[in-house]
Amino acid sequence: MKTPNTTEKTGLHPRNLHRFRYDFEALVKDCPELENFVFINEHQIQTIDFSNPKAVKALNKALLMVHYDIQHWDIPDNYLCPPIPGRADYIHYIADLLAETNNGSIPEGDAIMGLDIGVGANGIYPIIGNASYGWTFVGTDIDEKALQNCKKIIANNPKLIDVISLQLQIEPRFIFKNIVLPEDKFAFTICNPPFHSSPEEAAKSALRKVNNLENTKTTKPVLNFGGQNAELWCKGGELGFITQMIYESVKYPMQCLWFTTLVSKKDNLKNIYKLLNKIGATAIKTIDMAQGQKTSRIVAWTFLSPKQQQELLNSLQS
């Protein structure tokens, strides 16, 4: 049998720090509270119960502590507790995308600013992006309580104070309006949009997940990764949210190198491509991501020619 940390998880990005089995001994050493949730499964492998929200949160705390030097991290009950390996993948694929405009070299440092649409209470994308590449971020959300918690995370980790700024979106139906100012220039936007179109749809999805994880049948949905209404559903669901994002992005063509979003539902791609072509995107890219059984993808678009992309990136770094 291989030692616990040598079995590579399939599909994760080559630079993802979580490509191998979790080293629970190292994680528990730095984050003792995780020990309460670790057990040996029938395959004689250390693991946690991924259907238990408290176990998932403790694992996140430990991963952020060990791999990203975040010493104090917490989220309120029922807020989205993101699976860190998948979030890290998104960041690393953004880095590859930026490298294409930078002669194959990933642009690093605080001059590279990203806009995180829906930063949530957890601040995961800015935390990983800064730790991995030194990037800075503006994080936005429509949920004031989520932003207050994010502020607390930043305040409790002084290295984040100068690299993450937060902004409340005061008009929930908009995405970039009120946020992107005339003088702003972003290397990229990043977004994990609400997947569902109603609370009922979100509850059904949660039920399926828990039944799959526990291999049992239950009628009570438990959100193992949590999630408030705005994090899980919106009118029109994922496609409605991304459609709004695309239409708004047209108004800021010279202020962002790459607009990007996760697309969970493959069936939405056809409509997204059609809309991006309609509004005159000069380049559209789809990046497939896989984590275990789950397949997702990033769709990225720009309104800039290759020369303009280079000029914007140069202006950011000068």
Image (cartoon, grey):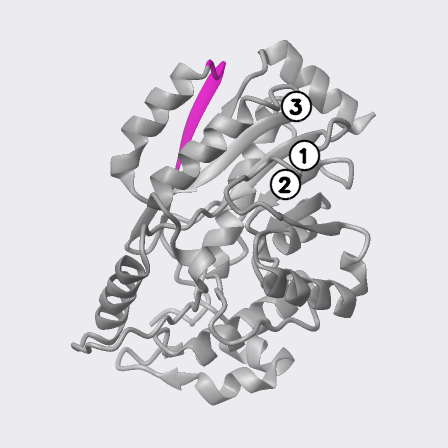
Residue 301 vs 11, above or below: the answer is above
Q: What label does residue 115 carry, if any?
A: 2
Q: Alpha carbon of mark 1 to alpha carbon of mark 2: how far?
A: 9 Å
Residue 237 vs 24, above or below: the answer is above
Task: Please tell me whether mark 1 sits on a helix, a strand or a loop.
Answer: loop
Q: Nearer the viewer, mark 1 or mark 2?
A: 1
Mark 1 vs 2, N-terminal side: 2
Mark 3 vs 1, N-terminal side: 3
Percent coordinates x, y for residue 302 in the rendering: 54, 21
Percent coordinates x, y for residue 91 in the rendering: 56, 44
Q: Which residue occupies the foreground of this view, 118 or 70?
A: 118
* Residue that extends furthest to the bottom in the rendered view of this protein: 36
Q: Do the residues labelled 3 and 1 touch (CB within 8 Å)?
A: no
Residue at 47 percent across and 69 percent down: it is 22
At label 3, counting other C-alpha atoms closer than 10 Å, the crowd grade (few under 14, some 14-19, many 20 or more) is some
Question: Which residue is tagged 3?
Answer: 102
Apparent side of residue 211 relative to residue 97 in the rendered image (left or right) = left
Task: Please tell me whether mark 3 sits on a helix, a strand or a loop.
Answer: loop
Q: Do the residues labelled 1 and 2 touch (CB within 8 Å)?
A: yes
Percent coordinates x, y for residue 154 in the rendering: 73, 63
Apparent side of residue 167 relative to residue 91 in the rendered image (left or right) = right
Mark 3 vs 2, N-terminal side: 3
Give the amino acid at mark 2.
Leu
Question: Which residue is tagged 1?
Answer: 180
Magenta region = 280-289
Residue at 54 percent across and 27 percent down: it is 249
